[in-house]
Amino acid sequence: MRVLLQRVTQARVEVASEVVGQIGEGLLLLVGIEPADTAKDVAWMSAKVSKLRVFGDADGVMNRSVLDSGGEVLAVSQFTLFGSYRNGNRPSWMGAARGEQATGLFDAFVEQMAALLGKPVPTGVFGADMQVHLVNDGPVTLMLDSRNPE
């Protein structure tokens, strides 16, 4: 499971020019699922994201998590995080989980994040053509991978 995490002052996702999810200050999460992912990956990722200290404290030091700061989370499915560009110039998406598996694990991740935060986690629309708008704060952008927890 991979998550591209971006600290934002605001973010929204649109489908067919309609806003389907939006947040103020918090985290925009682009979430990719691979075939080997399980509930264990979802649990690890939701715990890590919720506790990752990327928000400033009173001294401006990144010492607070989204939980500590009371921030919001917007999660958007992103199968292209498992794209391979090894052969040629057209990416292959074979590394991404198929829709049935990915949908279930993405939904489980969103549910776990909502439970940890104590508030709803808005999302995009799985499999839709989405436009994601954000104001990256910092900028702070991190790539998390449950198979390679650095």
Image: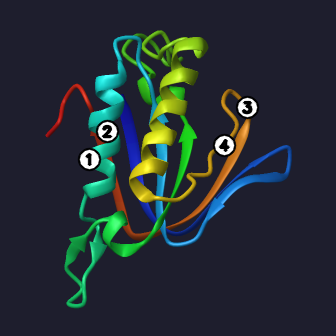
Q: Is residue 115 left or right of residue 132?
A: left
Q: CA distance from mark 2 to mark 4?
A: 19 Å
* Callout 4 crowding tier (Cα within 10 Å): few <14, some 14–19, many ≥20: many
* Callout 3 crowding tier (Cα within 10 Å): few <14, some 14–19, many ≥20: few
Q: Is residue 75 left or right of residue 137?
A: right
Q: CA distance from mark 3 to mark 2?
A: 23 Å
**Amino acid under label 4?**
Gly
Residue located at (48% from left, 25% from top)? 105
Q: Is residue 66 above or below residue 113?
A: below
* Callout 2 crowding tier (Cα within 10 Å): few <14, some 14–19, many ≥20: many
Q: Helix or strand or loop: what does disc 3 sit on?
A: loop
> According to the image, label 3 marks what residue?
128
> According to the image, label 2 marks what residue?
45
> According to the image, label 4 marks what residue?
124
**Quadrant into which the C terminus falls:** top left
**Quadrant into which the N terminus falls:** top left
Image position, residue 122 (x, y; %):
62, 51
Q: Which mark is residue 63?
A: none
Q: Helix or strand or loop: what does disc 2 sit on?
A: helix
Image position, residue 146 (x, y; %):
26, 30
Circles 3 and 4: CB distance less than 8 Å?
yes
Q: CA distance from mark 3 to mark 4?
A: 8 Å
Which of these two is toward me, 60 or 83?
60
Residue located at (53% from left, 17% from top)? 90
Q: CA distance from mark 1 to mark 4?
A: 21 Å
**Amino acid under label 1?**
Lys
Which mark is in front, 3 or 1? Answer: 1
Q: Is residue 77 left or right of residue 46?
A: right
> According to the image, label 1 marks what residue?
48
Total labels drawn? 4
Q: Helix or strand or loop: what does disc 4 sit on?
A: loop
Image position, residue 142 (x, y; %):
31, 51
